[in-house]
Image (spheres, rainbow, N blue to C red):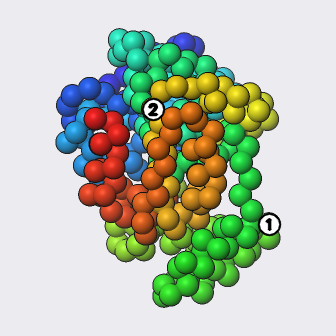
Amino acid sequence: MHFFTSYDGTELAFHTFGGGAPVICLPGGPMQASAYLGDLGGLPAHRQLVMTDLRGTGRSAVPDDTASYRCDRLVEDVEALREHLGLDRMDLLAHSAGTNLALLYATRFPERVGRLALIAPSVAAVGIPISADVRKEIARLREDEPWFPAASAALESVMAGQATGDAFRAIAPFWYGRWDETARAHRAAEDEQRNDEAAAVFGSEGAFDPDATRAALARFTSPVQVVAGEVDLNSPPVAVTELAGLFPHAELVVQARAGHFPWLDDADRFVATTSAFLR
């Protein structure tokens, strides 16, 4: 584990895995410690992964100004890490909510981004709507699973605005391509890894300007890979496809039978796809 000091004096942590040219990895959650990324299915065999713990998560310090948890302000932490590592340009890999941070960084510092890999991306920063019908359509792909009846009923409650803690726990199988022991353990660790206070600020008012971000992405010329899971309820392929279309040079990959964590569902396929892009 390593540390660096960001623009406001907050000490932030990052973890390195593997060797070779570094890839900066931004976790989702939002505001979840990078531990849940594991080693991304074995990707360190191909590139060095620099896993960042965003401020207030993992081993990174809690900032004095909690308003700095807002996504647009976290961009300065990514830039501070680049400067700490002495990189003129860096490859970025981001997952889920962390892709919003990657997009905002790419729009502010496009000249600093080599390759950009967006895994099961959130589309909040670019304002792409995801309808309840789209989520239900993805959910029905799992109707033969033994857990489906209870999870489907809970999903209806969540989408109706009647969410409870039990309902959110009940829909957990939808996030994974296989609801096996590995997936259960991964989900069980999430609560301790996430900073809920920071998560509430991450996407708060002023964090995103979708029109401006879309316009900037249309001018972003670096190579982009966007990976969607075929059965990902959170980031459905139809929304991810629309995100990919905002870039001049984006490759879209839909990983078969994968959920929101494609490196857990088929590590070999995920690593082959991602390492080929990051070559």
Discs 1/2, front: 2
Left or right: 147 with respect to 137? left
SS type, badge 1: loop
Q: Which of pointers 1 and 2 lies earlier in the amino acid sequence?
A: 1
- On residue 161, the disc is 1
Q: Residue at x 52, y 25 (%)?
A: 221
Residue 207 in sight from this viewpoint: no
Residue drawn at point x = 66 percent, y = 25 percent: 216
Q: Is residue 146 at all visible to an observer of this figure?
A: yes
- Viewer-side residue, 128 vs 247: 247
**Up/down of 55 relative to 251, above or below:** above
Asked which quadrant contains residue 171, the reply is bottom right
The residue depicted at 68 percent of the width and 67 percent of the height is 134
| Residue beneath the point at 62% across and 30% down | 217
Read off the residue under disc 2.
223
> Relative to 235, does residue 176 appear above or below in the rendering?
below
Image quadrant holding the C terminus, namely top left
Three-letter code for the amino acid on which mark 2 is drawn: Pro
> On the rendered image, what quadrant is the N terminus found in?
top left
**Residue 253 rendering spot, x and y as whole percentages:** 45, 53
